[in-house]
């Protein structure tokens, strides 16, 4: 893949250093609210604000029911039908959207279908295909980071039997978009045995008119499944709640593979409360934009190229070895993203609070002074 061609390159500007490893105490001062909770975690695309105050209160209020089996699933689905304007039978609840990916891959592509996906993309769909005899066709992203839908379509057409196309839009780990009009054109012309699993985990972060949800296909096309999560903009990654929206026919097939009571009681009540707190979503998006701007400014200043992102993480260039870079960051109290082959000269950085991003920027500048990036 000619990945460099899609990376934005900026010109190295003046470098402001800040003193190597001696920086650690100052780094922590720059983000005092993190101190009791340990490192600055910019590794897993989490919401640095935590969960909505309403969700927190709902969990506390329900703590006395921890000994009871979960209730409220129907109420949660009702709230989701209001949010999305889709009937209850189209929803499949999961313990995180990763469970939804698992159910969809295994219900639709197993035992011997073909999974067509981008490279690099989020690793869970191929992981869940692993135990089965599912063929995997990886197609490199285009130079601008979009899915190469033409080549993916060729791979799908050449396959025999059921095909499951995994489209992570926006894509993780690159943060890039695939224009929804192009996705629509393929869905429109696809045969019935080509399923589309459209992972919209980062849907809420996108502000681009070329992007919209694949939800509009759900009423008429049983071959489209949309996955959503409460882990990102609602900050519930540790609580585990996600869902699929798909045609009732497909929902019934996918649902058969779920674990009963998969969403625990606190996930359900916190999810419900989160849906009633649009202010928290707005605040999360605002903090993300401000944090991203701080990161972009620092990367521009240091002349480190990055992939402009539509999400809460940014893939940026490092010079030198990723493992050594991650280790040094960890020594400074900062966790950065894991390696994403083939982009091993890049690091995926999740966006933290503005204070955390200022702290990160200060460390990155000090790394430049040391000659490490
Ligand atoms: C694209 C994508 N899909 C799904 C997930 C899984 O999210 P969860 O299981 O927390 O809902 C992630 C997590 O980072 C992701 O990046």
Image: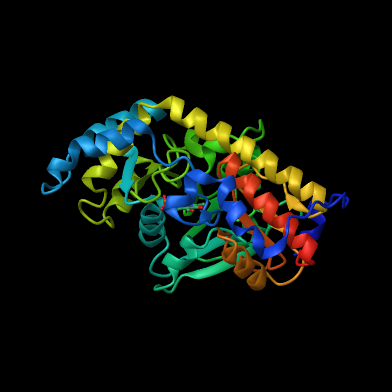
Q: Is residue 54 above or below residue 238?
A: above
- Left or right of residue 243: residue 183: right
> Residue 4 at what x, y percent from top left?
80, 59
Residue at image position (56%, 52%) is 28
Q: Which residue corresponds to the image point at 45% horizontal and 25% vertical from the top-left?
A: 279
Check the image and name the residue furthest to the left. Answer: 68
Relative depth, front residue between 344 and 57: 57
x, y percentage for residue 8? 80, 50
For residue 200, say whether it is visible.
no
Side of 254 relative to 6 (left or right):
left
Image coordinates for residue 83, horizontal then vertical, percent: 39, 28
Q: Quadrant of the C terminus?
A: bottom right
Query: Exactly how many numbered labels are in the figure?
Result: 0
Q: Is residue 368 above or below residue 266?
A: below
The image quarter in which residue 148 lies: bottom right
Q: Which x, y percent locates residue 179?
A: 66, 41
Q: Nearer the viewer, residue 31 or 234?
A: 31
Q: Nearer the viewer, residue 162 or 364?
A: 364
Horizontal placement of 123 versus 207: left or right?
Answer: left
């Amino acid at each position: 893949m000619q990945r460099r061609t899609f990376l934005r390159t900026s010109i190295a500007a003046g470098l402001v250093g800040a003193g190597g490893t001696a920086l650690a105490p100052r780094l922590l001062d720059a983000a005092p609210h993190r101190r009791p909770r340990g490192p600055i975690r910019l590794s897993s695309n989490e919401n640095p604000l935590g969960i909505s105050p309403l969700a927190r209160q709902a969990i506390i209020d329900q703590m006395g029911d921890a000994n009871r089996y979960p209730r409220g699933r129907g109420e949660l689905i009702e709230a989701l039908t209001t949010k999305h304007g889709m009937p209850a039978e189209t929803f499949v609840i999961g313990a995180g959207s990763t469970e939804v990916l698992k159910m969809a891959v295994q219900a639709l592509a197993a035992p011997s279908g073909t999974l067509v996906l981008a490279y690099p993309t989020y690793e869970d769909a191929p992981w869940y295909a692993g135990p089965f005899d599912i063929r995997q066709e990886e197609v490199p992203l285009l130079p601008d980071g979009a899915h190469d839908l033409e080549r993916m379509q060729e791979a799908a057409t050449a396959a025999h039997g059921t095909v499951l196309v995994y489209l992570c839009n926006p894509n993780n780990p690159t943060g890039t978009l695939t224009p929804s009009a192009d996705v629509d054109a393929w869905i429109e012309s696809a045969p019935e045995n080509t399923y589309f699993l459209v992972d919209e985990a980062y849907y809420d972060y996108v502000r681009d008119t070329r992007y919209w949800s694949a939800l509009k296909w759900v009423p008429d096309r049983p071959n489209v499944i949309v996955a959503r999560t409460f882990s990102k903009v609602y900050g519930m990654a540790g609580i585990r709640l996600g869902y699929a929206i798909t045609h009732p026919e497909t929902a019934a097939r996918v649902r058969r593979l779920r674990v009963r009571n998969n969403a625990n009681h606190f996930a359900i009540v916190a999810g419900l409360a989160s849906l009633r707190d649009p202010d928290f979503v707005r605040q999360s998006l605002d903090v993300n934009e401000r944090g991203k701007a701080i990161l972009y400014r620092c990367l521009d200043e240091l002349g480190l190229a990055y992939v402009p992102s539509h999400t809460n993480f940014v893939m940026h260039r490092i010079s030198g070895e990723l493992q050594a870079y991650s280790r040094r960051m960890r020594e400074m109290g900062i966790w950065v993203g894991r390696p994403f082959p083939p982009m091993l000269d890049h690091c995926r950085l999740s966006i933290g609070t503005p204070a955390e991003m200022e702290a990160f920027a200060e460390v990155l500048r000090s790394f430049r002074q040391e000659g490490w990036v």
